Amino acid sequence: MTEFLIGIDIGGTSVKIGIIENNGAILKKWEIPTNISNGGMAIVNDIWLSVREKVDSLNLNNTSIIGIGVGAPGFINAETGFVYEAVNIGWKNFDLANQLKEKSGLPVFVENDANIAVLGENWTGAGNQAQNLIAITLGTGVGGGIIANGSILSGENGMAGELGHIHVEENGYACNCGNRGCLETVTSATGIVRQAIEKIEAFPASLLGETYKKNKRITSKDVFELAKNGDSISNSIIKNTADILGRVIANMGVIINPSKVLIGGGVSTAGDQLIDEIRIAFEKHALPRVIEACEIKAAHLGNDAGIIGGAFLVLDKLHRNV
Ligand SMILES: [Zn+2]
């Protein structure tokens, strides 16, 4: 009998759910809105009702589902599936794993959402089941995850792999974490826009300045598009962004010694230019043997990484072969 896994990726606006085959193929995927009212208390019930409905409509045998793997934002105890705090959702001291276990009668495993995306990407995506891997997600913020010696690196209290908060700029911009000059303040979409605004103030007559005047705003996508069309100021922003990322990866190279560094997230989809420039900066700063072992490339799975990673988590925790 074919076995199935349920992969769940909980975000602030939607919950992505997938029924995944035990080879990582997606049988069915869908989304439901995240009901954050009343401290997010209805979410577990919403998820389970939706899963049940789908399992029934697909005529799947209940016993063919072997477990549920969940990625959730915030501070999580991956051992127990307890969520200390998930600000976007409203959970505080929320026993996610046990609640879902009670409803479903299935084994439930929970991980931080960034880590679960890394597990998915490493299973069926660009990671190709690497034993040592760094993933960096460039979106509104900067997230990340690390696989070291074949396992997700969680650290003493879950903070390992929070790459967005590596310090890169003395007296830099204030970060959401309370510090200044974190990687996230420079290389996220927000950070790129901030760099662009600085350039526009210095060079209002530039192509970037003209675009800003015309659209009354500037986006990171504008910067990439203008760079592609040869705008030197936009190019300098991408070079600066890539240089900082390349240096961070070079430094991490002597800690993790990865075979792969995967760059994902909305910013990374703007084209090959950023990843090409990151590679150049990395090779300028890293040790030769680190460079030799390491490939820097784009992540593949996009939004599916979380649900596939959730399924992988179940197999991994139940010690099934993958
Ligand atoms: Zn920070």
Image (cartoon, grey):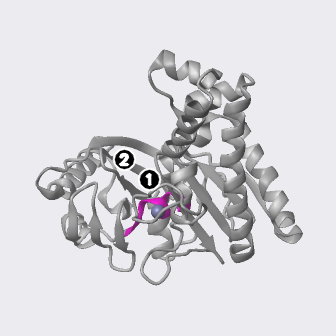
Dot 2 crowding, Cα within 10 Å, few <14, some 14–19, many 20+: many
Which image quadrant: the N terminus? bottom left
Q: Position of residue 114 (x, y in %)?
A: 47, 60
**Which residue ends up furthest to the left in the rendered image?**
38
Quadrant assignment, res 6? bottom left
**Which residue ends up furthest to the front in the rendered image?**
202
Q: Residue at x 26, y 46 (%)?
A: 56
Check if residue 310 falls in the magenta segment.
Answer: no
Q: Residue at x 57, y 71 (%)?
A: 321
Q: Amino acid at mark 2?
A: Lys
Compare marks 1 and 2 and give the one earlier in the sequence.
Answer: 2
Q: Specify the segment rendered in magenta.
A: 110-119
Q: Position of residue 266 (x, y in %)?
A: 53, 40
State if disc 2 and disc 1 touch (CB < 8 Å). Answer: yes
Residue 322 visible in the current orientation: no
Gap in angstroms between the C-alphas marked 1 and 2: 7 Å
Q: Which residue is mark 1?
A: 307
Looking at the picture, does residue 295 appear above or below residue 226? below
